[in-house]
Amino acid sequence: MVGLSHVAMRGLVRRYMPEGAVTLWPTEMLNSRRLPLQKVGETPETLKSDGETHLMPQILGNDEDNISRSLRKLEPWGAVGVDINMGCPVQKALKHNYGVALMGDADYAAKVVAMTVKHSKGPVSVKLRAGDQGDFNYLSKFSQGLVDAGAAWLCLHPRTAGQKRRGNADWSQIAELKKSISVPIIGNGDVQVAEDALQMFEQTGCDGVMIGRALTARPWMLWQLGAKWGWPNPPGFSGDPPKTGEEEAQAYGEALKFLLNEHQKYFAESLGLRKFLFFVKVSSPWLNFGHPLFAKVSGCKTYVQAAEILNEFFKSSQLRMTDKTNLRY
């Protein structure tokens, strides 16, 4: 997620991971045209914490030389594999024939996978959408081409490019893709609470679930899922994960305070505050008084001021989290 799945947010989500649990960690989307010219590990998008492992960077790309040069930088940095983004619908990606634009040319999309597999030491996955056609037959054939080219697994967000995040994700397409494709299928879209993830597993038979923006509001969702499966608590936590809307609101406040400290650790103040404000903008719609919180944080000029606002704001006993929002901001 651009502007979100950076080192600070990964640290926040990791804080609530059940002890012993392991997952692959995406980065922000990385542009394969820029990576060869950058100092990987020093840019805001490629910063990582000490000892951070299982990194699976997501790249935008369609040129073999750029992809090859990018991988030569990412693998020594710690990438265990790479994910090709064929789902981003924003204009910046489309104008370079990146993201969901690749879904308009099945043959070339397969070539992009093949060229990436050729140069990658680790597995290559693909994140994709339902495609402009919104036609499952097209999606199935397109996906099979990616698998034939060497994709190790696919992650499907079943909305068309035109929908962006509007409307509902069509989980039935995840189920159909799971039936028709031999590699693991990861489902994505409209998972806002832990129960949604469980329902996606049950309804689609998918091999895994990718959770996006909802983790900004509920980074403890993996703890909640672990509790349902009988897994250990996250290190340093005892008892049950937050359950009620009121408990989650207080947990959200604590999460923001932790995240702010992570921003101070990794980002210069001006950049860190901009990134923190964006995080609050994305996550606060799940809070009943999210708009006033965003307004207060918007005026912050220093990390100290932001911390003071959080401490004061979350003293309120009237705060609660809601299960559902429209996911737009």
Image: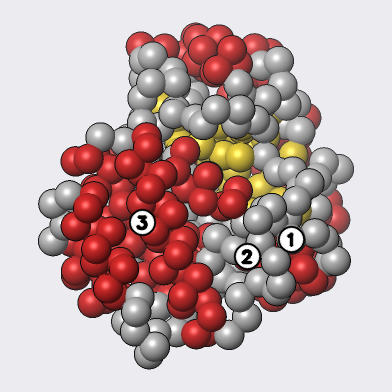
Q: Earlier in the sequence, mark 3 or mark 1?
A: 1
User: In this figure, which residue is indicated by the disc labeled 2?
Assistant: 221
Residue 125 drawn above or below residue 209: above
Instruction: For marks 2 and 1, give the CA distance.
Output: 12 Å
SS at circle 1: loop
Instruction: For marks 3 and 1, give the CA distance.
Output: 26 Å
* Percent x, y of residue 239: 71, 72
Tell me the kind of residue under disc 1.
Asn
* Percent x, y of residue 319: 39, 84
Which of the two discs, 3 and 1, sits closer to the camera? Answer: 1
Tell me the kind of residue under disc 2.
Met
SS at circle 2: helix
Q: Could you say which disc has been placed on residue 233 in the image?
A: 1
Question: In the rendered image, which quarter is residue 202 located in?
Answer: bottom right
Tell me the kind of residue under disc 3.
Phe
Image point 31% across, 52% down: which residue?
276
> Can residue 49 be seen?
yes
* Percent x, y of residue 99: 47, 39
Image point 30% across, 47% down: which residue?
275
Mark 2 touches mark 3? (CB < 8 Å): no
> Can residue 176 be seen?
no
Image point 66% across, 16% down: which residue?
120
Question: Few, some or many C-alpha atoms within 10 Å of disc 2 (few <14, some 14-19, many ≥20)?
Answer: many
